[in-house]
Structure formats: structure tokens, C-alpha cells
Image (tube, rainbow, N blue to C red):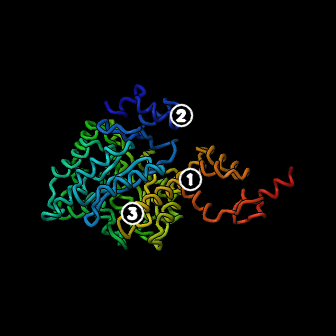
Amino acid sequence: MSIMTEAKTGIPDVVKAVAKYENLPPEKIARGIASGRIVIPWNPRHAPTPVGVGQGLRVKVNVNLGTSEDCANLDDELEKAGIAIKFGADTIMDLSTGGDIDEIRRAILKSVNVPVGSVPIYQAGLEFARKSAVVDMTEDDIFKGIETHAKDGMDFMTVHCGVTKESIAALKRSKRLTGVVSRGGSFLTAWILHNDKENPLYANYDYLLELANEYEFTLSLGDGFRPGCNADATDAAQISELVTLGECVRRARTAGVQAMVEGPGHVPIHQIEANVRLEKAICDGAPFYVLGPLVTDIAPGYDHITGAIGGALAAYFGADFLCDVSPSEHLCLPTAEDIKTATISSKIAAHAADITRGIDLDRDIAISKARAELDWDAQFANCLDPEHAKARREERKPSKGDDEDVCTMCGKYCAIKITKEYLK
């Protein structure tokens, strides 16, 4: 019995675990799971620490990692996974396309105790690309890839079910600047056009639901036509795909399968609220998982910032799950340091939105009290990256004496210290 089906009549152990972490009644979490507005990506073959994503919960952060054909080092990816978790990643996605992809995926699953996701069509498509062409994949190849990932223990999988003949027609009409920027979306677009057939993931969606039920993985309904620049945001292709994903959500719920919806992408600030509201309306409140969104296109090398701005706003308006954006987005495979920066940037965005929901205020209050007391140890204990904060202070720490408890920004003219002295 699936988690969703069980939650309709009882309270599974994974629901109790999520309720304890979120400090909410288990019955509330179970109702959210049963309605499809909360998901718990949890494959029993992996059995990670349960994490809830959706309505009324803390905003969660996913971190992408994985090899490429040019950079395929398993140890590097395991290091990145450890760094992401250390700095607060709630989930990990393995997007590997180079080296022994099966070995890398299984090693990552073994090394972490958070939910892990993947995009099976990457592997299926690339294996054919090396022999002939992506468009030579068969429907069986696509579904065998999904089943292999499921058997290995993947807790959630991106499946681009909304890339259809209809949405491709909308894409052709849209006159986009950047076309299709999703790798999985491009594979399926090429496959559909070359073979003149409907997307197997959509045409055989009932079979996909059977696999999800059998192996208990969560569907992450991918946005194959997400905008790749601000000028392409919220166009006909994106919305056509979203409408199809709304249908897929409803069918998944009927089958007792957990499903969340992936979203853009590059979106200017003034369109973020509309994008979130559209997803929530069309997909009946399904958890919304956004990449960024990136609010400007001019910041290669700094896209962790553009993504954090968009992520904070998207979460404020109701998005549930933020995918990290690293400084190397659009430039190269991220390094371990990029992963750290991306994770912390996304955690800041998620926490900023949680504050607006009245969640996790204690930590901000604790660090504020520590600042008021000039208690540096307590400040470090409550910040996202204590080691970094402490190292920066040590770089320019005041010399010993009457003012060693302040910082070198204000020194003896510290506003807090002066006010405290005269308010005694």
C-alpha cells in the first residue's frame, strides 16, 4: 500500500516522522498527503530520513550534483553530496551524465540519508546518443531506465510527461529566444518530432503510475519547456505543458501516487507570483518545485544570487521546494565550493520565506539576542555557516583591550555598546 493510500485511513510511520520534524499534528500531515498537497519522497529500498514537501510545511531545498562526460569523478560527487547536506540540503538530485552512471547513482544513494532524486531519461538518452542518436530510444528503453532507478532506491524522479505534440505546437508558435533548455525536454522533443509519435511518458502514463506504485517513488513532473531566459517566461509553450501536468497530477492522485510539479526557470520578478498562482490553481495545490527562478539573465558567475532572489519570492508566494542554483550555472560543472555557495544561498531564500509563514523564528531571535549582548560565540552557533563567520571575524578582530568585544566596523563607536552603557 502506498504512503498516499495508507494516509487516507491511517498515519504511516513516515508521516509521524515528518510531523515531529515540522512540529505539526500527524493528522494534519496525513490529510495533506491524502489530498496530494504534501508529498514525502521515500522509496523503501533507500529508506531515507522522511522529508515532507508541500502545503503548510517548511520550505525545502534540493541540491543538484552529478558528473558530466568532461568531469566524471565519483569522489568529487560524494564530497559535494556531503557538503550539501552539511549546509542544510533537504534532498539531493543526481544528474550524472558521465562515467559509470549506475555506479555513481548507487554510491550516492548509499552515502546519504536524505531523499535522492534523478532524471532517468538522461541515462537512457545518452546511452543511445553514444551508439547512434537520442531519437533511437524505444519506449521500452525509457521505462526500463525508470525501473532501474526505482529498484536502486530513488525516492523521486523527474519525468517530463507534459512535453507532448500539443505543447510542441505551442513551442513552435512561441518564437522563443532560447528554445528548449531542459535536457530531458530536448530529448523528448527531438524523439517526438523524429518518430512522429506521442511522448511515451504521457501516452503510457498509466504504466508509469503502476511503476510508481510498485516501487513507491514520487513523481516530479518535469518542466521540459521551462523558460531559459526572462523574455521566454510564461509563454504559450510553458503554460500548455503546465495544463497537461495538472491532468497528470489528478491522475496520479486517483492512482494513489505522490506527485509534485517542477517549475521555471528564468522568470522576471513581476511574473513570479502569477507563475506560482497558476501552478497552484491548475495543479490543485500540488507541491511546487522551482529552479530558482532566476530573475535576470546578466549574472553568469553570480546566479546563486539571482536564483536566491527568485526563490525567496516564489516561496513567499507559495512555492514549496527550491532547487539550488550555483555560481557556475550556465558556465561549467559546479565545484564543491560552488555547491556550498549554492546550498547556503538557497537555504537563505527558503528561511526568508519561512519567516513570513511564522516558521523558524527562534533562530533569528536567538542570533539577535546574541548580537545585542555582543556574544560572538552565540552568534556563530546560530548562523548558517559558523566556520565562515568566525573566520571572517578573526581576519580583522579588534586588538585586546576595552573594545575586543566589538567588531572593527565600528570599534569603540559600536552603537550597541554605547547605548547599553548609557541605558544602565
Q: Quadrant of the N terminus?
A: top left
- Give the image location of residue 384, x and y in percent: 55, 52
Residue 168 coordinates in the image, percent (x, y): 28, 63
Of 201 and 198, which appears nearest the observer?
201
Q: Amino acid at mark 1?
A: Pro
Look at the numbered disc 1 and give the secondary structure of its residue.
helix
Q: Quadrant of residue 153?
A: top left
Residue 99 on image: x %, y %: 23, 59
Tell me the tag on residue 386.
1
Please say if 199 is above or below 51: below
Q: Which mark is residue 330?
A: none
Q: CA distance from mark 2 to mark 1?
A: 29 Å
Side of 75 where 345 appears, left or right:
right
The residue under label 2 is which amino acid type? Answer: Leu
Q: Residue at x 50, y 62 (%)?
A: 271
Q: Residue beneath label 3, please? A: 335
Dots 3, 2 in contact, CB < 8 A: no
Identify the residue under disc 2.
24
Q: Nearer the viewer, residue 138 or 199?
A: 138
In contact (CB < 8 Å): disc 3 and disc 1: no
* Few, some or many residues within 10 Å of mark 1 (<14, 14–19, 20+): some
**Taking 206 as reference, is 309 above or below it?**
below
User: CA–CA distance between discs 3 and 1?
Assistant: 21 Å
Pick the front one: 369 or 410: 410
Q: What distance separates the C-alpha of mark 3 from that of mark 2?
A: 37 Å
Mark 3 vs mark 1: in front: 1
Q: Earlier in the sequence, mark 2 or mark 1?
A: 2
Q: Residue at x 46, y 49 (%)?
A: 86
Work out which residue is located at the far left of the displayed protein and give it.
131
> Could you classify mark 2 by the number of other residues whose Cα lies within 10 Å: few (under 14), some (14-19), or many (20 or more)?
some
Q: Secondary structure at mark 3?
A: loop
In the displayed image of the protein, which residue is found farthest to the top? 10
